[in-house]
Amino acid sequence: MKKYNILFLCTHNSARSILGEALASTHHSGLFQGFSAGSTPGDEIHPIARQLTQELGYDQTKLRSKSWDEYSSKDAPEQNTLVPAERRIITLVVGLFPSVVMASVNCFNNIPGKELLCG
């Protein structure tokens, strides 16, 4: 069975994109492999994101903040789709991943007072 690689992108790769990675990777169909990265990776995964990924049954050893430079190298896993967690990310990554389909989604915009979505 073919798996489709999906790369979730945001700024710090500590919450929103991490959740995308875990949701894709634990999808019941087994068709997706999630990846995540950020423009300026944070130092740690947000505690609520870590808790939610654990509840999903996602392998906790895979959780770390990563730069999207890791996925633009020749040795990186080939990505089928990019999912930006912020609108401004779209213009930053187009040149890094010119041949990858960018998902047309309503980005996960920050919601005032919702700390989890801000990193």
Image (cartoon, rainbow, N blue to C red):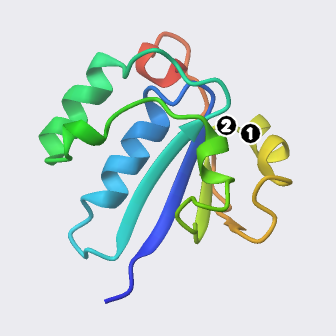
Please determine whether, in this image, residue 101 is positioned above or below residue 9.
below
Residue 26 coordinates in the image, percent (x, y) = 24, 59
Q: Residue furthest bottom?
A: 1
**Total marks drawn?**
2
What SS does tag 1 mark?
Answer: helix
Q: Secondary structure at mark 2?
A: loop
Left or right of 62: which side holds 42?
right
Which residue is nearer to you in this view: 76 or 55?
A: 76
Neighbourhood count class around disc 2 (C-alpha, 10 Å): few under 14, some 14–19, many 20 upward: some
Q: Which residue is mark 2?
A: 86
Expressed as whole percent of the image width and height from the top left, the position of residue 67 reads 60, 35
At 52% from the left edge and 18% from the top edge, which residue is drawn?
42
**Which amino acid lies under the numbered mark 1 shown in the image of this protein?**
Ile
Residue at 20 percent of width and 69 percent of height:
28
| Residue 89, numbered circle | 1
Q: Residues within 10 Å of mark 1 (few under 14, many from 20)?
A: some
Q: Which mark is residue 37?
A: none
How far, Cα to Cα, is label 1 from label 2? Answer: 5 Å
Q: Is residue 70 left or right of residue 34?
A: right
Q: The N terminus appears in which quarter of the rendering?
A: bottom left
- Tell me whether the residue at label 1 lies in contact with that at label 2, contact meaning CB atoms closer than 8 angstroms: yes
Residue 25 position (above or below residue 60):
below
Q: Quadrant of residue 47?
A: top left
Find the residue positioned furthest to the top.
Answer: 113
Residue mark closest to the camera, 1 vs 2: 1
In percent of width and height, residue 65 lies at 46, 29
Q: Residue at x 20, y 47 (%)?
A: 58
Q: With respect to residue 67, does 26 lie above or below? A: below
In this rendered view, identify the residue nearer to me: 82 or 110.
82
Three-letter code, disc 2 = Glu
In the rendered image, the vertical position of residue 44 relative to residue 70, given as above or below: above
